[in-house]
Image: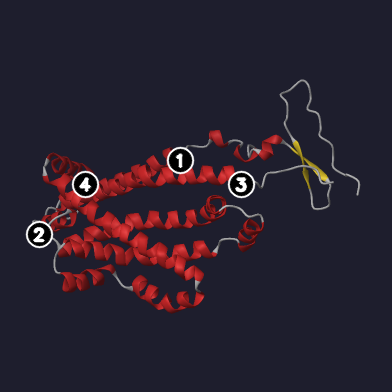
């Protein structure tokens, strides 16, 4: 069959060279594709005139702080402290010696519970993806864990383990395991069977299959679930500490509630919010960027050329 591709078009001499290419269609006829389309530049025209994402984030925070300040003007401090009063309480917390130690305790418990949940969730999800019958059989367990409020786990754990740090670890694991298990099951199930069969036919090494087929498929959903589980682990650990332990951020919040120190409660909330954002920016965001770069380099869908 003769080659019916449209030949490469020479760019005009007066302007900058247009490194376009010929892309084949389903009928075997090449189509002239400008390089700006190949690089995705056409979709970003005029984007430089739009406000940046950071600017919109700052606007959102400004609206929150302004609304908060307006609402707090007509309220007493023990009902709704304003931003300035909360800032004063926050400064006092950071100048005290107990905040850092309490924060470390809370993070250690949350991290331990999250590690246990990740180990159980990934293993459970992998087994479910390989055995549909086991997946169906264990689905009621996942549904029970998902639908049970976290406070129930706290009370049950206090009955089983007493009032100690083991309660926090158990509750964090029990709350985050269902999300990680479900995401892992869906991730492994989504691996393309045709690609795996192709890898077997071409006798690709196990490391190549894992790097170029399995990881690009399973990493995004598992990483997304891990991001959500990270925030859940911090919130749940504080809740468990509030009821079951005499140390940690949760215990300090309970003491502030008993003493009706509402500004301190708001200050602790600000600390935990900033901590969650920082962990996501320092730990999760770099992993996402490296994963995106890996997926971009391993994507071969932009190969273009004429059909013969």
Foreground: 196 or 152?
Answer: 196
Q: Do tag 4 and tag 1 residues touch (Cβ < 8 Å)? A: no
Q: Earlier in the sequence, mark 1 or mark 2?
A: 1
Residue 106 lies left or right of residue 26; in this view the side is: left
Residue at 74% x, 34% y is 20
Q: Nearer the viewer, mark 1 or mark 3?
A: 3
Q: Do tag 2 and tag 3 residues touch (Cβ < 8 Å)? A: no
Q: Tell me where residue 86 appears, x and y as whole percent.
A: 19, 45
Q: Nearer the viewer, mark 2 or mark 4?
A: 2
| Mark 1 nearby-residue class (10 Å; few <14, some 14–19, many ≥20) | few
For residue 82, the mark is 4
Image height of 4 relative to 122, above or below = above
Residue at 70% x, 35% y is 35
Judging from the image, what secondary structure is the residue with disc 1 in? helix
Q: Do tag 4 and tag 3 residues touch (Cβ < 8 Å)? A: no
Foreground: 43 or 36?
Answer: 36
Q: Earlier in the sequence, mark 4 or mark 3?
A: 4
Q: Do tag 1 and tag 3 residues touch (Cβ < 8 Å)? A: no
**Cα distance, mark 2 to mark 3?**
57 Å
Q: Earlier in the sequence, mark 2 or mark 4?
A: 4
The residue carrying mark 2 is 258
Q: Earlier in the sequence, mark 1 or mark 3?
A: 1
Inspect this view and state whether residue 20 appears.
Answer: yes
**Cα distance, mark 2 to mark 4?**
20 Å
The residue carrying mark 1 is 53
The residue carrying mark 3 is 299
Most distant residue in the top direction: 14
Residue at 43% x, 54% y is 223
**Cα distance, mark 1 to mark 2?**
41 Å
Q: Nearer the viewer, mark 4 or mark 1?
A: 1
């Amino acid at each position: 069959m003769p080659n019916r591709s449209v030949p490469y078009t020479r760019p005009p001499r007066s302007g900058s060279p247009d490194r376009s290419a010929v892309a084949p269609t389903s009928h075997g006829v090449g189509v002239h594709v400008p390089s700006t389309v190949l690089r995705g530049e056409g979709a970003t025209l005029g984007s430089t005139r739009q406000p940046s994402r950071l600017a919109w984030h700052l606007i959102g925070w400004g609206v929150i702080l302004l609304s908060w300040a307006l609402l707090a003007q007509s309220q007493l401090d023990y009902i709704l402290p304003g931003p300035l009063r909360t800032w004063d309480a926050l400064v006092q917390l950071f100048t005290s010696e107990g905040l850092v130690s309490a924060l470390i305790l809370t993070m250690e418990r949350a991290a331990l519970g999250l590690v246990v949940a990740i180990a159980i969730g990934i293993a459970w999800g992998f087994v479910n993806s390989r055995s549909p019958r086991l997946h169906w059989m264990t689905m009621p367990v996942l549904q029970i864990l998902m639908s049970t409020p976290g406070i129930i786990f706290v009370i049950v754990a206090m009955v089983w383990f007493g009032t100690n740090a083991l309660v926090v670890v158990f509750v964090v694991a029990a709350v985050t395991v269902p999300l990680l298990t479900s995401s892992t099951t869906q991730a492994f199930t989504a691996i393309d069977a045709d690609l795996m069969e192709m890898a077997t036919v071409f006798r690709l090494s196990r490391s190549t299959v894992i790097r170029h087929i399995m990881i690009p498929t399973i990493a995004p959903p598992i990483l997304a679930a891990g991001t959500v589980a990270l925030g859940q682990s911090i919130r749940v650990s504080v809740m468990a500490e509030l009821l079951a332990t005499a140390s940690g951020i949760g215990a300090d919040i309970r003491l502030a509630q008993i003493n009706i120190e509402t500004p301190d409660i708001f200050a602790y909330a600000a600390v935990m919010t900033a901590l969650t954002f920082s962990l996501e920016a320092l730990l999760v965001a770099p992993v996402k960027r490296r994963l995106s770069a890996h997926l971009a380099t391993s994507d071969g869908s932009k190969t273009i050329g004429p059909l013969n």
